[in-house]
Image (cartoon, grey):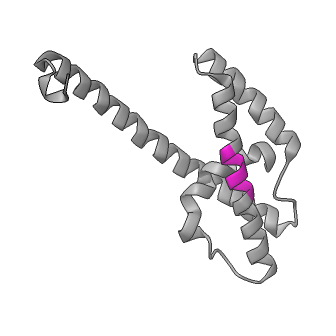
Amino acid sequence: MSTSEIDATVRAELDRLRESIDNIDAAVVHMLAERFKATQQVGRLKADHKLPPADPARETRQIARLRELAQSANLDPAFAEKLLNFIIAEVIRHHERIAEEAENGQVGSGEAENGEAESGQEENGQARNG
């Protein structure tokens, strides 16, 4: 059955559900952007005080916390952990870049390039970094 053959009621319900998914996706992107803004600030603070980009103890706590949240939300904890690990790796990469720029006397050159990604990752990166 092609999409053109789908009953109008079914089509309307699919459209409604997909619109909801699109709205949720937009919210997720905006939340990640806010997170990366915060993690970018963490990265700058760490660079200013010569702190390491990663904080493995915090990362471990954050992963455990996120797995519990995922479990309570009926989301696969392994999936949640993979997502957080991806975010943390990106945050650390950004922190390393910020530290390099600080050492080389460059100020904020990566903000425009990756500001949103960094902020989202910082929050998760705070698991490692904060």
Q: Is residue 88 magenta?
A: yes
Q: Main secondary structure of the magenta part?
A: helix
View extreme (bottom): residue: 105
- Region of the chain picked out in magenta, as a range: 86-92
The residue depicted at 69 percent of the width and 54 percent of the height is 91
Q: Is residue 101 at all visible to an observer of this figure? A: yes
The residue depicted at 67 percent of the width and 45 percent of the height is 86
From the top left corner, tell me how far across and down residue 22 is, in percent: 35, 37
The residue depicted at 85 percent of the width and 48 percent of the height is 55
Q: Quadrant of residue 44?
A: bottom right
Of the pair 105 and 18, the residue shown nearer to us: 18
Q: Is residue 90 magenta?
A: yes
Left or right: where does residue 38 sit relative to residue 98? Answer: left
In the picture, the quarter occupied by the N terminus is top left
**Up-down relation of residue 29 to residue 50 (above or below):** above
Left or right: where does residue 125 sit relative to residue 112? Answer: right
Left or right: where does residue 56 sit relative to residue 105? Answer: right
From the top left corner, tell me how far across and down residue 14 is, in percent: 25, 24
Q: Quadrant of residue 127?
A: top right
**Up-down relation of residue 85 to residue 69 (above or below):** below
The residue depicted at 76 percent of the width and 84 percent of the height is 105
Q: Is residue 123 at all visible to an observer of this figure? A: no
From the top left corner, tell me how far across and down residue 130 is, in percent: 79, 48
From the top left corner, tell me how far across and down residue 64 is, in percent: 77, 28
Question: Disc count in the image?
Answer: 0
View extreme (front): residue: 1
